[in-house]
Image (tube, grey):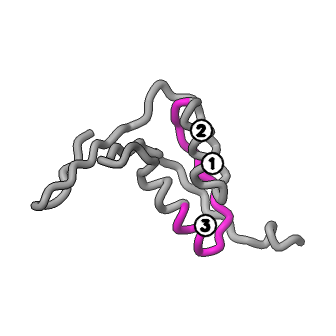
Amino acid sequence: MTAEAERPVYLLLGNVTTDLTPDGSTFGGTAYYSGRAAAALGYRVVVATRLPRGDARGLAASAPEIEWRAGAADASATFSNIYLPEGRTQLV
C-alpha cells in the first residue's frame, strides 16, 4: 500500500459559501473550513458540494489539498460580513 492509500479519508457533505468582506469575497462555510482543518491534520479530504461552475475552478485553486466533488448549482449561499466596533454582523 502507498502512503496515500493508508491516509484516513475525511468525507464531507455540505455547503461551500461565498463570504463578502470589506477586502472582497472569499470561500467559506463549514465544508470549506473543516475540510482545510482536516487536511492540515493529515487526512485525505473529499468534499461533496454544489456550487456554480465558475466557483469550482477558484475553489480548487484556493484549497488544492482537498479533493472537490461539485455538482452544478445556479448560485451559492452568500454571506455579507460587516465589521463594526460592537462586533460582526452577518447577512445572508
View extreme (left): residue: 86
Under circle 3, the secondary element is helix
Residue 16 numbered tag: none
Among the 4 quarters of the image, the one containing residue 78: top left
Identify the amino acid type marked 3.
Ala
Q: CA distance from mark 1 to mark 2?
A: 9 Å
Please report whichever mark, 1 or 3, sits nearer to the chain's N-terminal start. 3
Give the x, y percent position of residue 20.
34, 43
View extreme (right): residue: 1
Mark 1 or 2: the one toward you: 1
Specify start and end residues of the magenta stretch as a single range: 36-52
Q: Residue at x 87, y 71 (%)?
A: 2
Give the x, y percent position of residue 36.
54, 62
Residue 56 numbered tag: 2
Question: Is 46 rendered above or below residue 9?
Answer: above
Q: In the rendered view of the protein, which quadrant contains the N terminus?
A: bottom right
Identify the amino acid type marked 1.
Ala
Residue 61 numbered tag: 1
Question: Label 2 neighbourhood size at 10 Å, few (<14), some (14-19), many (20+)?
Answer: some
Q: In the rendered view of the protein, which quadrant contains the C terminus?
A: top left
Under circle 1, the secondary element is helix
Residue 38 shown in magenta:
yes
- In front of the other: 4 or 62: 62
In the picture of the structure, the residue carrying the numbered disc 3 is 39
